Amino acid sequence: MNPYLTEEKEPTQVLLDTLDYLGITIDEFKKMSDNQVKQVVERSSDV
């Protein structure tokens, strides 16, 4: 099970909380390229 997306492919609270901590809105996140998403994942693993 993916901790970041629900079965309906909607963001979970874990993803929303992580993005909020990093100062990124869900709309900004959805527009990111794969490379930008990888950078976010790397940043979130540091916290």
Image (cartoon, helix red, strand yellow):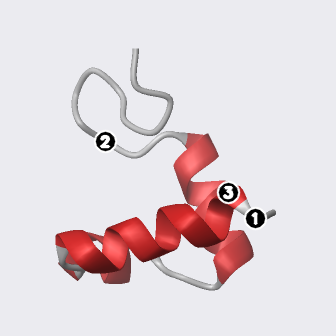
Q: Residue at x 66, y 72 (%)?
A: 20
Closer to the observer: label 3 or label 2? 3
Q: Is residue 21 left or right of residue 29?
A: right
Q: What element carries label 3?
A: helix
Closer to the observer: label 2 or label 1? 1
Q: Residue at x 67, y 57 (%)?
A: 45
- Residue that mark 2 sits on: 10
Q: Is residue 21 left or right of residue 42?
A: right
Query: Which percent across, then down, holds residue 11?
Result: 40, 46
Query: Which percent across, then down, holds residue 24?
Result: 53, 82
Q: Which residue is drawn at 48% across and 79% down?
A: 25
Residue 21 in view of the camera: yes
Q: In which quarter of the image is residue 36?
A: bottom left
Q: In this view, does 20 lie to the left or right of 5?
A: right
- Residue that mark 1 sits on: 46
Q: Is residue 17 above or below residue 26?
A: above
Q: In this view, does 11 lie above or below 42?
A: above
- Residue that mark 3 sits on: 45
Question: How far apart are the two marked residues, 3 and 2, measured between alpha carbons?
Answer: 21 Å
Amino acid residing under circle 2: Glu
Q: Is mark 2 on a helix, strand or loop?
A: loop
Q: Residue at x 20, y 69 (%)?
A: 34
Q: Are marks 1 and 3 in contact (CB under 8 Å)?
A: yes
Q: Do the residues labelled 2 and 1 touch (CB within 8 Å)?
A: no
Q: Is residue 38 above or below residue 11?
A: below
